[in-house]
Amino acid sequence: MSLKDAVDLIRDGSKIAVGGNSLHRSPSAIIREIARQKKKDLEIIKTAGAYDIDLLCAAGCLRAVSAGFVGFEVEFGLAPNFRKAAESGQIQVKENSCYTVISGLRAAAYGIPFQPTAGLWGSELPEAAGFKKVQDPYSGVEVYVVPALKPDWAILHVQACDPYGNARIYGSTFEDILMAKAAGGVILSTEQIVSSQELNTQPELTQIPGIFVKAVVEVPRGAYPCSCYPYYDYDVDHIRQYLELSTHRDRLEEYLYSLDMEVVGS
């Protein structure tokens, strides 16, 4: 379907898991369409966000962020719109580490209310996040548990899939497969749609089965300005331009409508 129709499926107030990691294989075209449609009160779930979370903060689409890290890596520094939204109280920052986000998604994927998690002892994170402890019924030892993070949608960008959403990811999968299992439904953007017959020649490369997927949008360079291995790296100049203009609402609006328009209604 079109990019516009796919994002129309997302309702205000939804919880959305966003695939990719930092500046790599983010579903950037879907993120920009969410901003163009002015979705409201969304909660974003991601281990390490950058362009995606920052842009949605700039566009006023978010009410909460559950993430371990949000920033533009060493080369570009912090995420200015996320920081502004957090400091002003525009959004609720739900404190996490990357691994507690993974634990919450695992609980949702397994259909259980929480996931025991090691490695939190000695940290102030459990208190900041409100993570509780339970007693292990076998050893009697107390363990921290992370509540399930159940997204309404996972939005992911992949390198190839068929029209039914059976998808291949080349290179690092990050948390995308886990998000697909945990979410109520998946919206995929893809560099290219290929035939099911082509996928069947190497079925072991299909990491996301179409049974999870509700929408497929063919968007070449759909992760841009982030990277998508092996096709393109992140665009340093574009990211610097975004960081310069994104704090100005009038310039942000123009920016949103300068990209993707050939695929929005296709």
Image (spheres, helix red, strand yellow):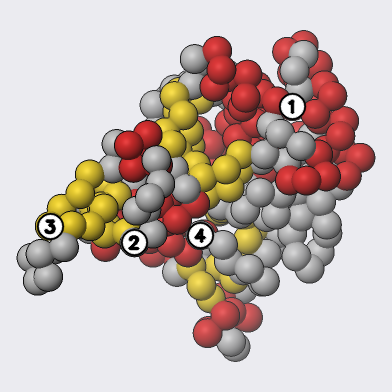
Chain-order first, disc 2 or disc 4: 2
Instruction: Return the residue found at the far bottom.
Output: 201
Residue at the far front in the pictured view: 122
Local secondary structure at mark 1: helix
Q: Residues within 10 Å of mark 3 (few under 14, many from 20)?
A: few
- Element type at mark 4: loop
Closer to the camera in the image, 73 or 106: 73
Q: CA distance from mark 2 to mark 4?
A: 19 Å
Q: Which residue is mark 4?
A: 175
In the image, which is nearer the foreground, mark 1 or mark 3? 3
Could you say whether the residue bearing mark 3 is in a helix, strand or loop? strand
39 w.r.t. 50: above or below:
above
- Tell me which amino acid carries mark 1: Leu
Cα separation, mark 1 vs mark 3, equals 50 Å
Between marks 1 and 2, how big is the CA–CA gap? 42 Å
Amino acid found under the numbered disc labelled 3: Gln
Label 2 sits on what residue type?
Ala
In front: label 1 or label 2: 2
The first of marks 3 and 2 along the sequence is 2
Q: Nearer the viewer, mark 1 or mark 4?
A: 4
Q: Residues within 10 Å of mark 1 (few under 14, many from 20)?
A: some
Query: Cα distance, mark 1 to mark 4?
Result: 27 Å
Give amino acid for label 4. Answer: Glu
The residue labelled by disc 2 is: 118
Image label count: 4
Do tag 3 and tag 2 residues touch (Cβ < 8 Å)? Answer: no
The secondary element bearing badge 2 is classed as loop
Residue 228, how many percent across, how many down?
Answer: 74, 59
**Mark before the other along the chain sequence, 1 or 3:** 3
Rendering quarter of residue 201: bottom right
Q: Which residue lies under the disc numbered 1? A: 256
- Give the residue pinned by disc 3: 135
